[in-house]
Amino acid sequence: MIPFSNLQAQNQPLREELLNAVASVLDSGQFILGKHVRQFEASFAEYCGVKHAFAVNSGTSALHLALLAAGVEPGDEVVTVPFTFAATVAAIYYCGARPVFVDIEPRSFHMDPAALAAAITPRTRAILPVHLFGQAANMDAILAIARPLGIAVIEDAAQAHGASFGPQALRVGGIGDLGCFSFYPTKNLGACGEGGMVTTNSDELAGKVSLFRDWGQDRKYHHAVRGFNYRMEGLQGALLSVKLPHIETWTLARRAIAARYDSLFDAADPEGILRPWVRPGAGNRHVYHTYTIRTPRRDELHQYLTEAGTGSAIHYPRPLHLQPAYADAAFPEGSMPVAEAAAREVLSLPIYAEMDPASVDVVVSQVSDWSLNHLIT
Ligand SMILES: *Cc1c(COP(=O)(O)O)cnc(C)c1O
């Protein structure tokens, strides 16, 4: 049996440190924000190479706060992609704004800059690209469109902690105007519960994020704006501070697992299987939140692996413009052909820092066997 992911394998070696962190929060009585969260914010800001980081209670809250800080209001349009987790689009609706979907690039699965350029209107208030699967979207092309128009760019970096982009190898979260991270347990940096972060280099945007996060209070019991309760808990801050120093080791391990998959797939070259594409360029670093392959008979392969005892997952089976919840955005079937095809064909294989390299060999043999016996016949 090869699981899709294994949280215990990560937490077990840190068990004592994590329990000590819990005790430290208990003893301090600082359960909401407080010193443990402040320390985690400072370390995470440094890790991302950004000036400000605000810890919140989920990645979804981070997206909502970033959109609010960017001034997104009812009636505004926010350009984003339909091939992402629902939170990206839900946060736009939380602001009373309308998502304007644009299609993705076929190999990266990221926002297609040409489609973005065509979708801008006078009501476009923000652009929300997603660094899907662990590598950065084409931020140069996106910023080249946004900057001259003064439109805010918000990075959904929920799957890409530590990924970098461009010749300067800028870390995600500090490339656009605001960055949003999730610490959902299975993300590359996972809390023991819910958590998220908003990052920015702008003092002005930082002030707004901080205001909206804590009831819109500019001082106690004085509510300058209609804010939210999106504060991170002290426990999560303390637990995440234990884990953050390990993220580089875990990222390198994920990259090693991905490299092993790549070389085995290149050698076996199974018919009808496309391995993940990596954006070329020295400063671009993929952190492999997922190792997502593509094949036209995906559902059959998914079932075959399940029966063979190997975990795999579909990220994501139905693009958001075709979800009943978001049908009012009025993008009919066929309007996002690249995203629609991706949703039919993608399959994520097991990858996590502690994964045994021998398991990678097993998964690749299973995929290759399936391809030989089931695809060509
Ligand atoms: C996980 C995720 C989110 C939401 O984060 P939560 O912490 O679960 O609220 C947003 N966007 C993307 C792309 C994600 O993968």
Image (cartoon, rainbow, N blue to C red):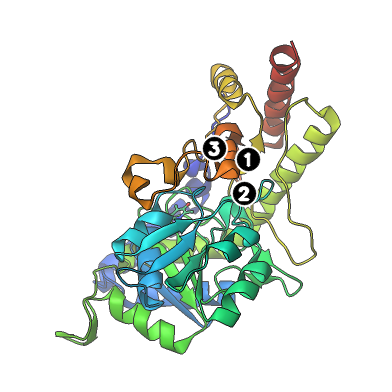
Q: Amino acid at mark 3?
A: Ala
Is residue 286 toward the left or the right of residue 73 in the image?
right
- For the point 42% across and 53% down, the residue is 184
Q: Which residue is mark 3?
A: 343
Quarter of the image for residue 341 reads top right
Location of residue 2 in the rendering, given as x and y in whole percent from the top left corner: 58, 28
155 and 101: which one is in front? 101
Can you see residue 36?
no
Beta carbon at label 3 within 8 Å of ligand 1 = no
337 and 289: which one is in front? 337
Beta carbon at label 1 within 8 Å of ligand 1 = no
- For the point 36% across and 70% down, the residue is 65
Q: Which residue is mark 2?
A: 109
Is residue 293 toward the left or the right of residue 1 in the image?
right
- Mark closest to the chain's N terminus, 1 or 2: 2
SS for dot 2: loop
SS for dot 3: helix
Position of the N terminus by quadrant: top right
Q: Amino acid at mark 2?
A: Phe
Q: Which residue is mark 1?
A: 292
Q: CA distance from mark 3 to mark 1?
A: 12 Å
Q: Amino acid at mark 1?
A: Thr
Q: Nearer the viewer, mark 1 or mark 2?
A: 2
Location of residue 60 in the rendering, given as x and y in whole percent from the top left corner: 37, 59
Position of the C terminus by quadrant: top right
Disc 1 and disc 2 in contact, CB within 8 angstroms: yes
